Amino acid sequence: MTTPLIGITTSELRAPREHVNRPESEPPMRELALGLSYPDAVVRAGGVPVVIPPFPTDECIRALLRRIDGVLLAGGPDLHPSLYGQEPGEHLGPTEPALDGSEVALVRMALEQRLPLLCICRGAQALNVARGGTLVQHLDGHRQDVPGRRPTHGVRVEPDSLLARALGATALEVNSFHHQAVDALGDGLRAVAWSDDGLVEGIEAVDRPFAVGVQWHAEGLVDAAEQHALFGAFMLEAGAGASPRVNAA
């Protein structure tokens, strides 16, 4: 198996850091942010991470997708509800519509090319929206106040699902850092995991070899065998389709 190149999306923008505004430095600017737990999880599972910024054109996205072997959709801010035909609710957090559009376009193109997709938290929501689904704009009580490496609630997984096979489990404990969730499912998607209160916690595409979304932050729980196995299954699928690359001298 060729070592797969895994693109990881970045959809979070942060304000300029004032402490870098020194006379000898360039002016502060908005920055992209990505937790190191994402690339760390990819490396631990045997892949090579490639950070993906938002792209200005579809052709940029296509050019990238020709060179990578799988896409990891990371967590981040709320998706703007205009993407799924709704008006913003009163609890909607900060959004970045231009970034949303780039990410949803990337998901659609990756699905067209049948690239393996592992979608985490916001990423699972983006997968659903990219397929024409909708989101619950606000939920109370689904954001824990302890570190992400500590699971806080249970999830049951449909035994006859790709997700269950990837995890090697049909029941597990997960973390929770979200206030939005999958509502109406997008085309070709099915719900395959639920929290104790019935909220959808996992989805997968029935018409693609590996397109899985989980509402929890699996990258923060990779010390647990089943979460590491999920990344391992993703890497196996990406590696199986990877082409050997010749190093240029």
Image: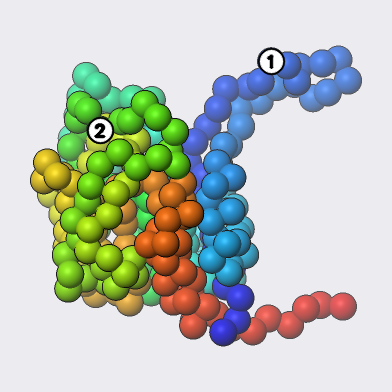
**Image position, residue 218 (x, y; %):** 40, 51
In-front residue for pair 137/111: 137
Q: Which of these two is toward me, 130 or 170?
A: 170
| Residue at x-position 44% and y-position 50% | 221
Secondary element under disc 2, as helix, strand or loop, is loop
Q: 67 left or right of 211?
A: right
Residue displayed at 22% across by 63% down: 170
- The residue at 16%/65% (across/down) is 158
Q: In front: 81, or 192?
A: 192
Name the residue type under label 2: His
Work out whether mark 2 precedes mark 1 in sequence or the reverse, and give the earlier one.
1
In which image quadrant can residue 76 be found?
top left
The residue that mark 1 highlights is: 18
Quadrant where the C terminus sits is bottom right
Circle 2 is placed at which residue position?
142
Q: Secondary structure at mark 1?
A: helix
Q: Is residue 3 above or below residue 149?
A: below
